[in-house]
Image (tube, grey):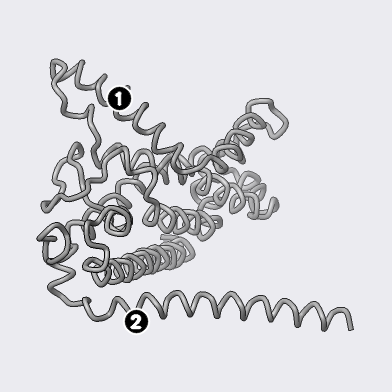
């Protein structure tokens, strides 16, 4: 009886969540579908963002997530590999790093934005300008590279935790079997442990992409621009981003009613883009898993 009651309550909770999600997505689709067209997706914004399209924001979002992934995946995976496969579990350093990762995951995203402004833009960027450009501002200003670095720092705990869990889930017999057959520790890691843990590692990458594509606060101070109808071509260029575009139109537009259709359509595109990025990551995960399973 208690089991049936628990199952019933769980099912009811699940249905409520699905219903809320359906209402939100339905509302966005209903009000955003009218503006949606190829011209809206491929054109630049005009007339103070009350007309035109959102292509610079789409390009900026994809470029930002791509740069963030390049920064966060190697750092997160190597950190997790060291913690799980090389460091002693009872060492003070491991406990300190694990505590730091847990605390980092709880820091509000706006704090990451302020940190990125202070550290990456003002300290690192201006240091680079002082060393290589005679103090002229090239990298000591908000840019896409600093926004990507800030988002990489924000999503780093996700990658470390999911990779650690994936490495921990590989059976000890498999790990020790490779060593017993004469493989070195690095060969064992590269040929056996990493391929076995790859689905979990790439799941961390997918979660990082999902979070990075939707975050606004960390990039407000580090690189996102209010209105910039051209594409970023250099690491020190500013850029438009879909989430920040939505935030600006919803809070700072002189005519909120005029921008409302564009606002809904932009949210619809942002959701679709995040979904597509996740699908791409899932596809790559499946391809790599199949490749490693075949021993290539």
Q: Where does the N terminus fall, quadrant-wise?
A: bottom right
Q: Quadrant of residue 200?
A: bottom right
Residue drawn where x is 35% and y is 46% of the image = 68
Q: Is residue 238 above or below residue 12?
A: above
The image shows residue 14 at horizontal and vertical percentages of: 63, 77
Which residue appears farthest toward the right when viewing the image? Answer: 1
Q: Where does the C terminus fall, quadrant-wise?
A: bottom left
The image shows residue 267 at horizontal and vertical percentages of: 33, 67
The image shows residue 249 at horizontal and vertical percentages of: 27, 58
Instruction: Quickly name the residue at label 1.
Output: 122
Q: Which mark is residue 283?
A: none
Nearer the observer: mark 1 or 2; the answer is: 2
Of 159 and 212, the residue lying toward us: 212
Of 128 and 47, the residue lying toward us: 47
Residue drawn where x is 40% and y is 65% of the image = 278
Q: Quadrant of residue 47?
A: bottom left
Q: Quadrant of residue 218?
A: top left
- For the residues labelled 1 and 2, the Cα–Cα distance comes to 44 Å
Judged from the image, the secondary structure of the residue bearing numbered disc 1 is helix
Q: Is residue 144 above or below residue 21?
A: above
Graded by Cα atoms within 10 Å as few (under 14), some (14 to 19) or many (20 or more), the crowding at tag 1 reads some
Please report whichever mark, 1 or 2, sits nearer to the chain's N-terminal start.
Answer: 2
Along the horizontal axis of the image, is 292 left or right of 200? left
Along the horizontal axis of the image, is 263 left or right of 88? left
Q: Which mark is residue 30?
A: 2
The image shows residue 220 at horizontal and vertical percentages of: 32, 43
Residue drawn where x is 19% and y is 21% of the image = 129
How many discs appear? 2
Residue drawn where x is 70% and y is 53% of the image = 173
Q: Is residue 203 above or below residue 13?
A: above
Query: Are discs 1 and 2 less than 8 Å apart at CB?
Result: no
């Amino acid at each position: 009886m208690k089991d049936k009651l628990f199952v019933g309550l769980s099912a009811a909770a699940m249905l409520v969540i699905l219903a809320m999600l359906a209402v939100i997505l339905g509302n966005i689709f209903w009000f955003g579908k009218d503006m949606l067209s190829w011209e809206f997706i491929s054109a630049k914004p005009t007339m103070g963002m009350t007309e035109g399209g959102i292509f610079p924001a789409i390009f900026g979002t994809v470029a930002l997530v791509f740069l963030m992934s390049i920064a966060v995946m190697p750092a997160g995976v190597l950190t997790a590999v060291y913690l799980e496969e090389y460091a002693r579990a009872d060492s003070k350093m491991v406990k300190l790093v694990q505590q730091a990762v847990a605390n980092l995951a709880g820091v509000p995203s706006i704090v990451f934005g302020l940190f990125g402004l202070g550290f990456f833009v003002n300290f690192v960027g201006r240091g680079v300008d002082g060393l290589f450009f005679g103090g002229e501002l090239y990298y000591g200003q908000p840019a896409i590279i600093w926004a990507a670095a800030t988002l990489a720092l924000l999503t780093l705990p996700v990658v470390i935790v999911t990779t650690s869990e994936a490495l921990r889930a590989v059976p000890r017999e498999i790990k020790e079997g490779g060593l017993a057959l004469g493989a070195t520790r690095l060969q064992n890691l590269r040929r056996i442990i990493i391929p076995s843990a790859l689905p979990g590692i790439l799941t961390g990458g997918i979660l990082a992409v999902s979070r990075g594509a939707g975050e606004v606060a960390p990039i407000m101070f580090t690189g996102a621009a209010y209105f910039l109808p051209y594409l970023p071509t250099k690491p020190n260029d500013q850029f438009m981003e879909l989430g920040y575009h939505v935030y600006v139109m919803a809070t700072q537009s002189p005519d909120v009613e005029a921008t409302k259709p564009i606002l809904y359509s932009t949210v619809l595109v942002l959701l679709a883009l995040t979904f597509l990025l996740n699908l791409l990551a899932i596809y790559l995960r499946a391809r790599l898993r199949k490749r490693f399973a075949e021993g290539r």
